Amino acid sequence: MAARSLAVFGVVLDVFLVLTAATNPGFVVRITQAGLDYAHQHGITVLQKELAQLKLPDISGDFPVRHLGKVHYEISSLNLRSFQLPYSRISLVPNVGLHVAISNAFAEVDGNWRVKFHFIRDHGSFDLEVKNVYIKIDLKLGNDASGKPTVSTSACSTRISSVHVHFSGKFGWLYNLFYSAVESRFRKILEGKVCDSVVSSVNGDLQRYLQTLPVTAKIDAKAGIDYSLVAPPAATEQTLDVDLKGEFFSLAHRGAVPFQPPALALPPDHDRMVYFGASSYFFNTAGFAYHAAGALVFEITDSMIPKGVEFHLNTSTFAAFIPQLDKMYPNMLMKLRLSAPSAPFLSITPGGISLQPVADIQAYAILPNTSLAPLFLLSLTGNVSATIDVKSGHIVGKLSVGRMKLSLKHSDVGTFQVRMLQSIMNVYASSILLPRVNERLAEGFPLPLPDRIQLSNILVQFHQNFLLLGADVHYTPRERR
């Protein structure tokens, strides 16, 4: 019985570990307080414009005066001339979201008034000053079914400390009769209107902007990147972390990735506005996706050899190392087809990025009728390192090839010394294959950025199992027509 219970516990533990591993993101975006402050500045600018466009309703009513009866008043044509938000701050609320506090805001309003008291009638204009307005906003962050980020207003409150009205007209004593009623109703209306505008701005402008974050980014005709959120954004005391799937996939056939992302523990750096943590899983799914798409195949022909290279890709050149070629396929052009028998797998350590790719090199002779005759099949292994940078919102890279090793897997032209081909293969790899791979890597892969964001002051660091990119952010507002 004990053994059975232990076995069941073991199965449950295995399932738990698998599920836990599956929740690890392949890519993490970390927004620091500096990044939140920058976003907050632009958000407040938008909110201030929204508040300045508030439409205020007319106010009318009867105000009882002891022993004298009722004063009927009408306030109309209210025009909000300005609404200023000079002081505000945004703060993180751990495990909840964001809190925005606005203080000492003020507004200016003008309009018309009309009053009737028994046989007395009067009208005129007024100026109203609203001072010491305090607004508190709580923002809840989440993600929808498609993996895009969401934001909503979980709480909003407005408190107006001071309202001062200046009436123009003849009967000052009359205005004082209904002043308190007007001031009280106006305060209540404006407090409600402010929060209505906040909710509308958050649910409208801010939500629409967050939806511009790409859930999937198409790279080329072969592959794309899944940047969907795997969990709601998590607020800590110092940062806002957004966990993304961070997985390349084949556009032709998306299959399950046969390995799991490692746990990411980003360092507590705060010098930049935003940090991107790209795990080794992120990069290795790229190799897996391109391999699944059949894209890791490359052919080299004689026409591709640079002019500075003294030898050609033909049987005459290779006959110096494989004498049988002169007899079997004299003076014929050749073709080399490089393919990866399995997806390349890289490692990231504090020392950098490295990988040891394996490639099969099938050599062919091109017969007079353009058909191909197989000659030999080589296996190539090498040590490759990579440098990484960020340009125009893309991760770009460049590979450097170290020592390469050849081995013979099969020959249709008899035995020969493979090591004799080492130097010529080094030339083909360094002068043809590597430049073309680096040309593609220079185009880069897009980072998960919403619209109109540019990065600067780039930081690149290597850590165990992940690459850390840091940057400051510049946002370009859309021009209003």
Image (tube, grey):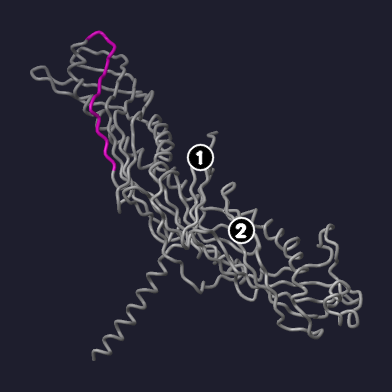
Q: Tag 1's secondary structure?
A: strand
Q: Is residue 170 shown in magenta? A: yes
Residue 294: where, in percent of width, then height? 66, 71
Residue 51 vertical placement versus 228 (above, below): above
Neighbour tally class for label 2: few under 14, some 14-19, many 20 plus, Cα within 10 Å: some
Residue 33: where, in percent of width, then height? 38, 43
Three-letter amino acid code of the residue under disc 1: His
Q: Magenta: predominant secondary structure element?
A: strand
Residue 230 left/right relative to 302: left
Q: Which residues are magenta?
A: 156-171
Three-letter amino acid code of the residue under disc 2: Ile
Tell which of 449 and 414 is nearer to you. Answer: 414
**Are the two marked residues, 1 and 2, in contact with CB atoms closer than 8 angstroms?**
no
Regarding residue 453, the answer to whether it shows in the image is no
Sequence-first disc among 1 and 2: 2
Residue under label 2, please give it: 219
Residue under label 1, please give it: 474
Residue extending furthest left? Answer: 67
